[in-house]
Amino acid sequence: MSLVSMRQVLDEAAKGGYGVGAFNVNNMEQIQSIMEAARETKSPVIVQASRGARAYSQDRFLYHLMLAATEIYPEIPTVLHLDHGNSVETCKSAIDMGFTSVMMDGSLMPDGKTPSSFEYNVDATRRVVEMAHEKGITVEGEIGCLGGIEDGHGAGLDGLAHLTDPDQAVEFVEKTGLDALAIAIGTSHGAYKFTSKPTGATLKMDVLIKIHQRLPNVHLVMHGSSSVPNDLQDIINQYGGKLKPTWGVPVEEIQLGIRNGVRKINVDTDNRLAITGAIRKVFAEKPEEFDPRSYMKPAREAMKKVVALRMTQFGQAGHAGDYAPISLAEMAKHYAAQPVLV
Ligand SMILES: [Zn+2]
């Protein structure tokens, strides 16, 4: 079994009316957590690495860990996706390494901070689409800007500063021919998404629904979509952590998104919280321990639990065996026959 096309996984999710979590990884334990959760819940899965993750891990390590995942979990359709590629060159390096999907985030300039022009975004995304589709690789683009900064990426703005304009989204999809569209609806990267439980004024599900009505066949992507539940925050604070009160995106809002075209949901913070809480607990309760396995194992288990829960909530659970993977060469033929798939 090899890594599969994200386009196929999202097309199947659209047919089945469910969403697929895209979970960020930096190391072996996180990959194992996700794959175990996928096996337990029989879920197709998207594993994603940001530029920060590629630098931290030396990405060849991550890539080979993912190949190991396909050998150990052959029944799970598994995508390896580049999260927030900042330039055509970054996307090319991921494609050359063997990623089966890339995000070209042309909503920001290559510095990953400065909001770009629409024309720049169309041009950069279109170039990545041409390069990627030739090899059967999927492309996600972004229109509008997410809030916050994560791994040095982001304009550091409020999540409401650059919401996606539905008309511009239509033009963007038509001009780029991408496979999946990340939209800005008020969410932010990182743990501090909202200062109180989000309302219709801060989390703009109405914008998402408008975009879906205009682009009913386009796979929408929700970024910054950790739910940041209280129980995960509490474990950290109970064992010496100092998280400030914060709110994420409620699961029921994500489920509303899934009923309105959302097929990929990015989750990172919840897993980071689960890992850190589990490690803090061991450190507090068993200060005599010094074998890293004594805290990495509970950390892995805690992340697995969160991922399995999200897989069930997003609806991808039970769908791993629904379809046979299409090879990337076959995907390339589909793209060649129909360059713009929307
Ligand atoms: Zn993101």
Image (cartoon, helix red, strand yellow):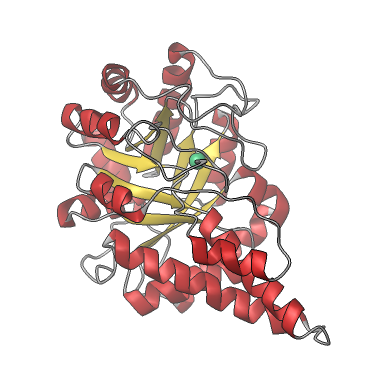
User: In the depicted view, which residue is nearer to us: 13 or 262?
Assistant: 262
At 32% from the left and 38% from the top, the residue drawn is: 179
At 65% from the left and 25% from the top, the residue drawn is: 111
Q: Quadrant of residue 278?
A: bottom right
At 31% from the left and 39% from the top, the residue drawn is: 220
Q: How many marks?
A: 0
Look at the image and tell me in which quarter the C terminus lies: top left
Tell me if I can see residue 134 in this picture.
Answer: no
Q: Seen in the image, is 204 located left or right of residue 56?
A: left
Percent across and percent down for residue 216 are 17, 35
User: In the depicted view, which residue is nearer to us: 109 or 95?
Assistant: 109
Q: Quadrant of residue 210?
A: top left
Q: Is residue 47 above or below residue 177?
A: below
Percent across and percent down for residue 296 are 67, 77
User: In the depicted view, which residue is nearer to us: 238 or 211?
Assistant: 238
At 35% from the left and 65% from the top, the residue drawn is: 311
Q: Seen in the image, is 308 located left or right of residue 91?
A: left
Q: Is residue 194 above or below residue 278?
A: above
Q: Is residue 25 above or below residue 336?
A: below
Look at the image and tell me in which quarter the N terminus lies: bottom left
Tell me if I can see residue 81 in this picture.
Answer: yes
Percent across and percent down for residue 293 are 71, 82
Percent across and percent down for residue 55 are 70, 48
